[in-house]
């Protein structure tokens, strides 16, 4: 498991973020980057113990955790309510929670599994966006970031259901960006393989081989996504909305045989 070290935060920015699926991996990297610049953050995750550990590493003076399943509407509501109670606002939402419970061909895919993937990866992101919009962003503005994937931009062997859900998230991003403008900006990040427990099946035991196709010579790490996420969830990106930022170590450069 890739865990990032804690970081001493900067002065309080007065801004607040909710990051889903943030007890480890990319979500943790995003939360860490936001805390480091001085934001206060609510993180969510399914495992309460792992969430508590993440809060301790990030700093309980700046971070709270709310355990639950991302697709559970009651959990979505509680997470936003707890954020508002603790910090009085929720400027930013980072939808990172996701699942990929199956590897195989779409022709053989159990439709119940397909529904679970879509529910967790897409519907939950919409649900959280609705909750933060109603609680704060509609009247006060803010920004939303969806974590998609390069699997949503091109066919990916054996993870077709995941790719379809991430393609839907790209479209969800532009739909929300159009509907929530001008007060709320909505963007997404599409990573290639990032070294996390979630993606371990794609590189574990063969990392050198997996990284060989990347022009930058390595797989991603959570910090690569965290820094870009903090930018898009910040004033510096104030004229950026409806965009899907591909962070892939140059992988797509090889699509044309380069």
Image (cartoon, rainbow, N blue to C red):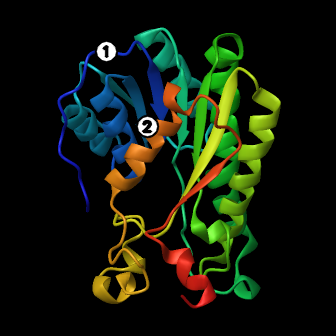
Instruction: Identify the residue at horizontal 45%, vertical 20% (top origin).
Output: 16
Vertical side of 44 occupied by 151: above or below? below
- The residue that appears at 34% across and 90% down in the rendered structure is 209
| Residue 181: % across, % down | 76, 27
The one of 77 and 230 positioned closer to us in this rendering: 230
Q: Report which residue position mark 1 lands on.
A: 12
* Residue 183 visible from this viewpoint: yes
Residue sitting at 29 percent across and 45 percent down? 50
Q: Is residue 122 left or right of residue 98?
A: right
Residue 40 position by quadrant: top left
In the picture, the quarter occupied by the N terminus is bottom left
Q: In the drawing, what numbered circle is on residue 119?
A: none
Q: Residues within 10 Å of mark 1 (few under 14, many from 20)?
A: some
Residue 113 found in image quarter: bottom right
Q: Residue at x 23, y 40 (%)?
A: 53
Q: Which mark is residue 230?
A: 2
SS for tag 2? helix
Quadrant containing the C terminus is: bottom right
Residue 250 percent coordinates (x, y): 48, 72
Where residue 54 appears, x then y in whole percent?
Answer: 27, 40
- For marks 1 and 2, the one nearer the N-term is 1
Of 7 and 113, the residue lying toward us: 7
CA gap between label 1 and label 2 equals 15 Å
Secondary structure, mark 1, is: loop
Residue 105 at what x, y percent from top left?
Answer: 67, 87
């Amino acid at each position: 498991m890739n865990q990032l070290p804690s970081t001493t935060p900067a002065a309080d920015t007065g801004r607040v973020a909710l990051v889903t699926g943030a007890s480890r991996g990319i979500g943790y990297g995003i939360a860490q980057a936001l805390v480091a610049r001085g934001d206060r953050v609510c993180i969510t995750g399914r495992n309460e113990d792992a969430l508590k550990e993440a809060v301790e590493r990030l700093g309980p003076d700046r971070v709270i955790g709310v355990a639950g399943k991302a697709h559970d509407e009651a959990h979505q509501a509680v997470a936003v309510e707890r954020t508002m109670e603790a910090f009085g606002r929720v400027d930013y939402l980072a939808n990172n929670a996701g699942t990929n419970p199956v590897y195989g061909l779409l022709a053989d895919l159990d439709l119940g599994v397909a529904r679970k993937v879509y529910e967790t990866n897409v519907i939950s992101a919409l649900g959280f966006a609705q909750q933060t919009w109603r609680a704060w962003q509609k009247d006060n503005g803010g920004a939303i970031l969806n974590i998609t994937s390069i699997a949503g931009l091109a066919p990916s062997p054996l993870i077709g259901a995941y790719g379809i859900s991430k393609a839907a998230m790209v479209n969800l991003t532009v739909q929300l960006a159009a509907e929530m403008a001008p007060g709320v900006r909505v963007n997404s990040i599409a990573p290639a393989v990032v070294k996390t427990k979630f993606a371990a099946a794609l590189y574990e035991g063969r990392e050198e081989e997996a990284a060989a196709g990347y022009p930058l010579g390595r797989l991603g790490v959570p910090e690569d996504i965290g820094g870009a996420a903090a930018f898009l969830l910040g004033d510096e990106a104030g004229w950026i909305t409806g965009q899907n930022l591909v962070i892939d170590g140059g992988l797509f450069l090889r699509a044309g045989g380069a």
